Amino acid sequence: MTLSILQNEIVSSKGNMIVSASAGTGKTYTMVSKIAYELEQNHTHKVIAAITFTIKAAKEIKNRLKIDTTDHFIGTNNSFVIEEIIKPFIRDVYGLEYNFDVTTDYSKKIKTFKSGMQILKENHVICSYENNNQNFVFELAFEIVKQSRACRLFLQSKYFKIYIDEYQDCDKTMHNFFMYMCNNLGIELFIIGDPKQSIYMWRGAYPEAFNGILNDPNFQHKTLTDNFRSCKQIQNYSNILSDETIKLYQNIVDKNAIIYIKSLPHEWPILIKPYLDINKNYAVLSRTNNDAECNANQMIKSNLDCTYISRTPISDISTSTAWLYNALAQYFILEKYSVYDFMDEIPEQSIGDKKIKTFIENKLNLLDQLIKSNNQSQIIIQVKELGDYLNYECEDEHIIKLINTILNKKYHSAFKLDEIRSVSMTLHSSKGLEYDQVIIFASDYNLENKEDINNHYVAVTRAKSKLIIINFIGDEKMHLKGVQYCKYIIDRLCPLGLKPNDIMEII
């Protein structure tokens, strides 16, 4: 890729900036290019932080940057505040009784900040609130920053800029924290995201924060709209879903990229066959895991290739050791995943140390033998020893989930998405992915609900060349949901003087 004129403006502009980036517009490429440019321009001792919501996204940024990032922080939101604020400065605010290393276990739920601090003091564990709209990790970090002058001076002297990806998924506490970093500590922010892709409001995401910054005079605002992924017709369809992008609609003659089919619940795989190119990859996106599995089975019964991407047992693990279970699963499931790939996953670790490599390699070889013989008790012992060596605590129940993930082949497909041509998965699992063809179901979306509109937008924009929309008939409940879907689309098209058959082929 080469930078467009607008992307070049974003990369070379100075000061605080917020970028609205619709799906497929090269969001990550733009942010990585800006990081690289500003690091080259930086001639001070200060460094940057690039903050994401997932380890995978952080690793993608590291891999794309072709410069040395050793001294810079590139990682998740939580790891940033835990490593840079909570661990080094909690004693400065709450006293020497907190003079210990901490870990996390977000499966442990608390009701109040006071109870969270008590568990942290007694068990050395950072928990999470029962209420998804509250964020204990960031609340604690924010309190430390506000009360510790040493912490504030440290952050101001270390960081000249913080880059925050997927800002629409931040909650209120995270937003207040980042605004404090900018307005009170004078650390510049580069924020990028898309409120249309906010699909985590159920767990506290607050996309209104993103919209609020758009009107902040301290921030420049740029908008990326050129979609490099989807064809023009699919771009048109996704653009009409939002008031922000509906003005981007452009009339086109060809309508065969979007197919709308009415079908009985058991007939849809047969009806989509004439419109599906089996030589290109495709994804069937569903609301729930059960639906995704059932839809994969229906496709297979109709002689259409389809692999169900199951949620893995280890995906439920929320402790700070979760990365280790994921790395071990990849090592024993993926043929080309080496000890070096494993070491790349280690947070805050000196991966060039030969002694570390030798120890890990020996443990992995031993675990390989134990897994082949299904020696569960010894596997638990060896994984715990590996965790201890890397300073991560492993629990028996989590190691059993790891063993189940490795030994049960139905979970392996979740680690091999790059190798699988045709899949069935939940729409939440599809975020960040793209397929030539996407099949979705109108009954999965209550388009009178803001979050469902965002879910629909994310599902639609996974498609590059074809989108097939199934509307069920013959089932009263599904039919009513289909009627709601049609009403919403008609209402969105009305101001443009268009009807549904102007934007899709109706079968």
Image: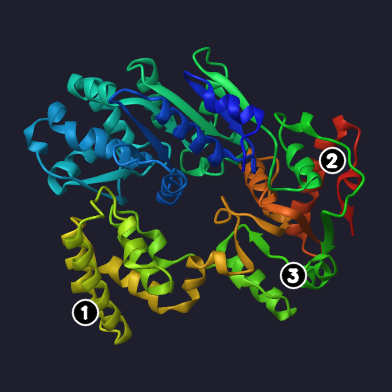
Q: Which residue is mark 2?
A: 490
Report the number of discs: 3
**Quarter-of-image position of residue 142:** top left
Badge nearest the viewer, 3 or 1: 3
State yes or no: discs 3 and 1 in contact (Cβ < 8 Å): no
Residue 442 visible in the current orientation: no
On screen, residue 230 above or below 188? below
* Quadrant (top left, top right, bottom left, bottom right) of the C terminus: bottom right
Front residue of this view, candidates 269 and 54? 54
Q: Which residue is mark 3?
A: 279
Q: Secondary structure at mark 1?
A: helix
Please determine whether, in this image, residue 294 is positioned above or below residue 498: below
Residue 76 on image: x %, y %: 38, 43
**Which is nearer the N-term, disc 1 or disc 2?**
1
Quadrant of the frame with the N terminus: top right
Measured from the top left, where is residue 470 in percent x and y?
78, 59
- Left or right of 210? Residue 22 is right
Q: Is residue 502 left or right of residue 50?
A: right
Q: Amino acid at mark 2?
A: Ile
- Foreground pick, 483 / 34: 34
Mark 3 residue element: loop
Quarter holding residue 238: top right
Q: Amino acid at mark 1?
A: Ser
